Image (spheres, rainbow, N blue to C red):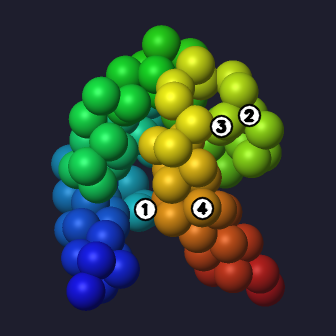
Amino acid sequence: SRINNIQTIHIKHLLNCSVENGQLSDPAHWAVADVVNYFKATGFEEQANAFQDQEIDGKSLLLMTRNDVLTGLSIKLGPALKIYEYHVKPLQTQHLKSNVS
């Protein structure tokens, strides 16, 4: 299914990040280029550049609100909704869960 494909791509990206950067796969450690590559790898090639233009690194990504994604990136509403619901929000949730002591 599409969700499983997204999760697989997401996991592969996290593994690539940890290998390429020698850092943890936590999005909080992603550079702007990692964020851009993540969105390119998940099928948002055209929209990925908006994250570059706005200098969104992993820490910034984890702080983004729905409104930031829908209005702050100057991308079309359809892709922006998918980016927030299927990527930004789950990354934030995953980050919070993995950092609860």
Residue that badge 4 annotates: 85
Residue that badge 3 annotates: 69
- Above-or-below relation of 71 to 4: above
SS for tag 4?
helix
Give the CA distance from mark 1 to mark 2.
Answer: 26 Å
Location of residue 86 in the rendering, given as x and y in whole percent from the top left corner: 51, 64
- Comes first in the chain, label 1 or label 3: 1
Crowd around label 1: few <14 · some 14–19 · many ≥20 (10 Å):
some
Query: Cβ–Cβ below 8 Å for labels 2 and 3?
Result: yes
Q: Nearer the viewer, mark 4 or mark 1?
A: 4
Give the CA distance from mark 4 to mark 3.
Answer: 10 Å
Residue that badge 2 annotates: 68
Q: Nearer the viewer, mark 1 or mark 2?
A: 2
- Amino acid at pointer 3: Val
Between 65 and 81, the one nearer to me in the picture:
81
- Comes first in the chain, label 1 or label 2: 1
> At x 74% / y 47%, what residue is drawn?
66
> At x 24% / y 67%, what residue is drawn?
9
- Amino acid at pointer 2: Asp
Location of residue 91 in the rendering, given as x and y in whole percent from the top left corner: 56, 64
- Amino acid at pointer 1: Leu
- Comes first in the chain, label 4 or label 1: 1
Residue that badge 1 annotates: 24
